[in-house]
């Protein structure tokens, strides 16, 4: 980690910064915003070269598409994204820029020929790496969405567009309280308060969401005021639609929800379960915290739980 003399963090990925700039030309390796990085970007398209300013004329959002010809999941996702782009998203003001992770220019050109949008000049490998780092890309395909001012809206654009391929909610500002059913979001990057409520009906789940929304929105507002990329804590519901819910339940030692087999062929009906409150802190080496069984999930109880977490008063448990 690289830290200023004032104690403010410059970058948490100092190892990569030093490895890629061993002579220290860019010392102290301050992370540039996407807007700063894209200012000098050379983009290519059917009509030739253009700047980001030219590309964004009349556009309302920009999606940076990190992908590669050699990546099988990318080969599956690209045709879908292209179809959605041509059918609805382009007309609604979305511009897409392909940021290639291909191993050579020939592969880049072959793959880009299948795509109906723009691309970052393949020769600028450093800018591709910097954009990938700025968008916290951990794997491809990955889609990061920026607004018209080139401010980050979401780094989980792939989940957003898959859930809304017509672009009804474009540019897909994240909800203060997310649903695990729509993807893990920033679960691995940010401490996440999870409310397991698989037994709840739609009305009860909505009531839980409404109880959490003011607190979650306050965290988002504080982060924006401080110029941070994301909130200190994210908030998420694990509903019955969330395929990851049983797996995460097991990881944090909560009993499963749902019946086992009884007899040789029949399944017991799902046993109802009261909402449970867990804080999953994967960035802290896989730590997690579980509220006492019977804790009613309210705005006050959640605030108290988070205060205990910040003060180090909760029992830390370790994911195995």
Image (cartoon, rainbow, N blue to C red):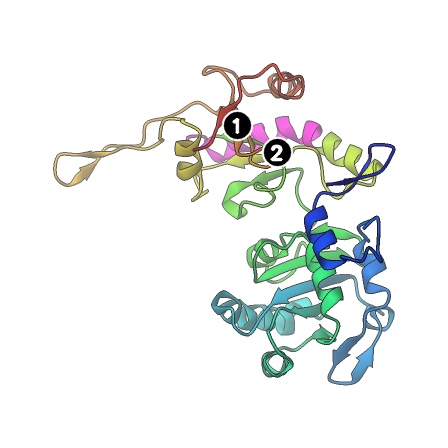
Q: Quadrant of the C terminus?
A: top left
Q: Can residue 33 be seen in this view?
A: yes
SS under mark 1: strand
Q: Can residue 95 be seen in this view?
A: no
Q: Residues within 10 Å of mark 1 (few under 14, many from 20)?
A: many
Residue 100, placed above or below residue 16: below
Q: Residue at x 67, y 54 (%)?
A: 169
Q: Position of residue 287 (x, y in %)?
A: 53, 29
**Closest to the observer: 9 or 223?**
9
Residue 106, placed above or below residue 122: below
Q: How crowded is mark 2: few (under 14 residues within 10 Å), some or many (20 or more)?
A: many
Where residue 237 sits, quadrant-wise, is top right
**Closest to the observer: 179 or 152?**
152
Q: In this view, does 195 lie to the left or right of 121?
A: left
Q: Is 295 a magenta residue?
A: no
Which segment is the magenta one?
A: 197-216
Q: Where is residue 166 in the image (x, y as percent from the top left)?
A: 62, 62
Query: According to the image, label 2 marks what residue?
Result: 191
Q: Are marks 1 and 2 in contact (CB under 8 Å)?
A: no
Q: Where is residue 206 in the image (x, y as percent from the top left)?
A: 56, 33
Q: Is 210 a magenta residue?
A: yes
Q: Where is residue 201 in the image (x, y as percent from the top left)?
A: 46, 32
Where residue 92 sits, quadrant-wise, is bottom right
Residue 97 got which mark? none
State the CA–CA distance, disc 1 to disc 2.
9 Å
Residue 288 got which mark? 1
Mark 1 or mark 2, earlier in chain: 2
């Amino acid at each position: 980690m690289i830290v200023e003399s004032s104690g403010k963090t410059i970058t948490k990925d100092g190892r990569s910064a030093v490895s890629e700039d061993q002579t220290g030309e860019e010392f102290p390796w301050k992370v540039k915003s996407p807007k700063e990085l894209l200012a000098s970007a050379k983009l290519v398209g059917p009509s030739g070269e253009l700047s980001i300013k030219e590309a964004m004329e009349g556009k309302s959002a920009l999606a940076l598409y990190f992908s590669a010809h050699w990546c099988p999941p990318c080969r599956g996702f690209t045709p879908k994204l292209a179809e959605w782009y041509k059918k609805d998203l382009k007309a609604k003001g979305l511009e897409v820029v392909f940021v290639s992770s291909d191993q050579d220019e020939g592969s880049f050109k072959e793959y880009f020929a299948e795509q109906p949008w723009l691309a970052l000049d393949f020769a600028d490998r450093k800018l591709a790496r910097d954009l990938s780092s700025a968008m916290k890309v951990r794997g491809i395909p990955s889609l990061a969405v920026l607004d018209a001012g080139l401010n980050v809206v979401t780094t989980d654009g792939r989940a957003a567009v898959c859930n809304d391929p017509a672009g009804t909610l474009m540019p897909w500002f994240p909800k203060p309280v997310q649903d695990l059913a729509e993807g893990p979001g920033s679960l691995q990057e940010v401490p996440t308060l999870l409310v397991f409520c698989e037994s709840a009906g739609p009305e009860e789940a909505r009531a839980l969401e409404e109880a959490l929304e003011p607190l979650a929105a306050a965290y988002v507002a504080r982060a924006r005021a401080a110029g941070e990329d994301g909130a200190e804590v994210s908030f998420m519901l694990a509903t019955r639609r969330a395929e990851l819910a049983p797996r995460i339940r097991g990881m944090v030692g909560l009993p499963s929800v749902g019946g086992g087999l009884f007899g040789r062929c029949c399944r017991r009906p799902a046993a109802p379960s009261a909402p449970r409150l867990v804080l999953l802190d994967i960035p802290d080496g896989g730590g997690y915290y579980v509220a006492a069984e019977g804790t009613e999930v309210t705005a006050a109880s959640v605030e108290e739980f988070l205060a205990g977490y910040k003060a180090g008063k909760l029992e830390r448990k370790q994911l195995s």
